[in-house]
Image (tube, rainbow, N blue to C red):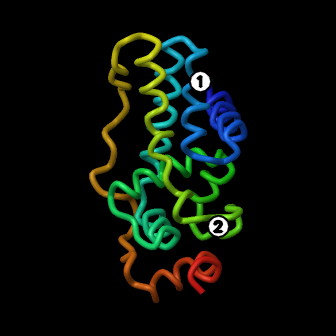
Amino acid sequence: MDETEFWELIDGSREAAGDDPVEQADALVERLLGLDPDRIADFARHFESRFNRACTWDLWAAAALLLDGASDDAFDSFRCWLIGRGRHVFEGALHDPDQLAGLLGDFDEETDGDGEDIGYAADEAYEQLTGAVMPDLGLPAPPPEPLGDYLDPDDDAALAERFPRLWARFRD
């Protein structure tokens, strides 16, 4: 599976679900069930690779700003949700999390930002198809700490300075 096919599966599932992350996870599982187990594992590798790339202090702070706080688990779910938004949003946020102010449409912190189920879609499809758990993907271990310089998500002044567009849109 190449990167284009990966993103096509993500985009197709999001469009089918009307941007609802829980329904997107279900739609993604359905699409993955049409693939053979090796291709599902390829999809999982693409997903995990992006999940690990998104483990940065800047994205964690942006998630905390958007969600009014973000624990470890909430940040994991946010990264899954971010991948689920598609390549344009994901890459834009990775390049500069402040771009999320313009990349996101309506955002409801109660329903948006939580894509935990999207993160389990490949595992669920693989298990349904084979009756076995997903094998080891052979990827490097995730970083022990987020990449980049730490930014305190409770420091409003630092958040406003680092993310002026996000701050203006979601906190002012």
> Residue at 63% across / 64% down in the picture?
107
| Type of amino acid under label 1 | Glu
Q: Position of residue 50 (x, y in %)?
A: 50, 43
Of all residues shown, which one is farthest toward the left? 144
Can you tell which quarter of the image residue 14 is in? top right
Residue for badge 2: 99
Residue for badge 1: 30
User: What is the distance, in whole Å, between disc 1 and disc 2 at their CAs?
Assistant: 31 Å
Can you tell which quarter of the image residue 169 is in? bottom right
Q: Position of residue 134 (x, y in %)?
A: 37, 21
> Residue at 67% across / 40% down in the picture?
17
Placement of 51 over or under 125, stated as above or below: below
User: Relative to 153, is 99 on the left or the right?
Assistant: right
- Camera-near label (1 vs 2) is 1
| Type of amino acid under label 2 | Gln
In the depicted view, which residue is nearer to us: 168 or 113?
113
First-in-chain label (1 vs 2): 1
Q: Position of residue 22 (x, y in %)?
A: 54, 43
Placement of 5 over or under 140, stated as above or below: above
> Residue at 43% across / 64% down in the picture?
60
User: Relative to 169, is 126 on the left or the right?
Assistant: left
> Residue at 65% across / 45% down in the picture?
86
Quarter of the image with the N terminus in it: top right
Q: Which mark is residue 43?
A: none
Q: Position of residue 55 (x, y in %)?
A: 41, 54
- Dot 1 falls on a residue whose secondary structure is helix
- Dot 2 falls on a residue whose secondary structure is helix
Q: Are marks 1 and 2 in contact (CB under 8 Å)?
A: no
